[in-house]
């Protein structure tokens, strides 16, 4: 697979820049956190949660759900850049493990590892899964959402820019290979509709998703062409207004370390 080279520093920079607008615009990511959290609640109702580690906490959508609803004794948060700490109150009992999750040491003896909308950025997911398994206690849980192959398909088709997303089958295979039992695995397609392709690009910029498009420079001409080409992803809504669709493809997983 020709995996696009992910410049982690650039990813961090784009997300840091989008931090202020992220919460307002990342509607799908918030819904994904809520869906993941519901699945977690179903599976984790009687599990002691002494030590919990979140990979790629971002502005804290999932974090706040956990803090409000789960009896966590110690919560350790990770993200690429220290600026994320501004989204959390100093009063909250949180420890930090800032840095690239593919490079840093993981905390140990964990009851639960969680991650929402972050693992698609990994260059070696097998190694991340292996480290997660090693960091968990026996029977510890690994709950995450990532994105599948239809994610932002309109952008990839029109610009050639985007990540190489994994299929749900490949994710399951990788988890099983690393010694996880998969308790739940599901996927869905969520479409956001916009009044104009320009708003699609503004939405992506506001959520930091353009972190992949490092080599993509828009000219007036290429932008106009993009708008024209996006017509093929448009349709008339119930009021007869033309709307332009953007697809998200979340995958949800609840896994458990087997021994």
Image (cartoon, rainbow, N blue to C red):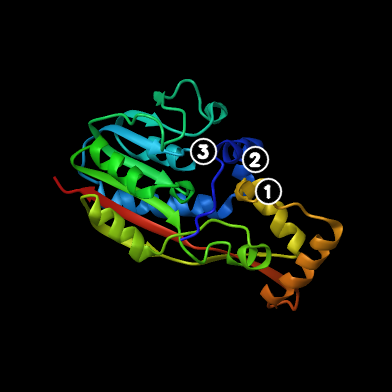
Per the image, the residue denoted by label 1 is 205
First along the sequence among labels 2 and 3: 2
The answer to which of 173 and 150 lies nearer the viewer is 173
The residue located at (32%, 61%) in the rendering is 185
- Label 2 SS: helix
First along the sequence among labels 1 and 3: 3
Percent of width and height locating residue 48: 21, 36
Quarter where residue 237 is shown: bottom right
* Residue 69 vertical placement versus 33 (above, below): above
Percent of width and height locating residue 131: 30, 39
- Label 3 SS: loop
- Residue 230 showing in the rendered view: yes
Q: On the rendered structure, is 218 left or right of 210?
A: right
* Residue 171 vertical placement versus 101 (above, below): below
Q: Are marks 1 and 2 in contact (CB under 8 Å)?
A: yes
Q: Residues within 10 Å of mark 3 (few under 14, many from 20)?
A: many
Task: State how far apart marks 1 and 2 are (Cα).
Answer: 7 Å
Residue at the far top: name it.
Answer: 90
Residue at the far right: name it.
Answer: 220
Per the image, the residue denoted by label 2 is 18
Percent of width and height locating residue 219: 83, 56
Percent of width and height locating residue 65: 42, 41
The residue located at (44%, 42%) in the rendering is 62
Task: State how far apart marks 2 and 3 are (Cα).
Answer: 10 Å
Per the image, the residue denoted by label 3 is 58
- Give the mark count: 3
The residue located at (42%, 55%) in the rendering is 35
Q: Residues within 10 Å of mark 1 (few under 14, many from 20)?
A: some
First along the sequence among labels 1 and 2: 2
């Amino acid at each position: 697979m020709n995996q696009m080279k992910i410049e982690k520093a650039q990813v961090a920079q784009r997300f840091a820049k989008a931090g202020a607008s992220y919460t307002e615009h990342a509607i799908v990511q918030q819904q994904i956190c809520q869906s993941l959290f519901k699945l977690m609640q179903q599976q984790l109702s009687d599990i002691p949660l002494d030590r919990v580690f979140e990979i790629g906490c971002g502005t804290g959508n999932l974090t706040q759900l956990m803090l409000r609803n789960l009896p966590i004794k110690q919560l350790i948060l990770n993200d690429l850049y220290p600026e994320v700490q501004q989204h959390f109150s100093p009063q909250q009992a949180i420890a930090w493990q800032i840095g690239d999750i593919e490079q840093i040491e993981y905390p140990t003896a964990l009851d639960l590892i969680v991650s929402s909308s972050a693992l698609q950025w990994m260059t070696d997911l097998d190694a991340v899964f292996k480290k997660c398994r090693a960091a968990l206690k026996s029977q510890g849980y690994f709950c995450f959402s990532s994105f599948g192959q239809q994610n932002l398909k309109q952008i990839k088709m029109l610009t050639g820019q985007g990540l190489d997303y994994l299929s749900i089958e490949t994710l399951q295979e990788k988890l099983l290979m690393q010694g996880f039992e998969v308790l739940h695995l599901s996927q869905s397609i969520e479409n956001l509709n916009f009044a104009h392709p320009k708003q699609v690009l503004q939405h992506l910029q506001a959520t930091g998703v353009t972190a992949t498009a490092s080599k993509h420079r828009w000219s007036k001409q290429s932008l106009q062409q993009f708008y024209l080409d996006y017509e093929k992803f448009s349709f008339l809504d119930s009021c007869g207004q033309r709307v332009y669709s953007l697809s998200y493809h979340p995958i949800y997983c609840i896994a458990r370390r087997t021994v």
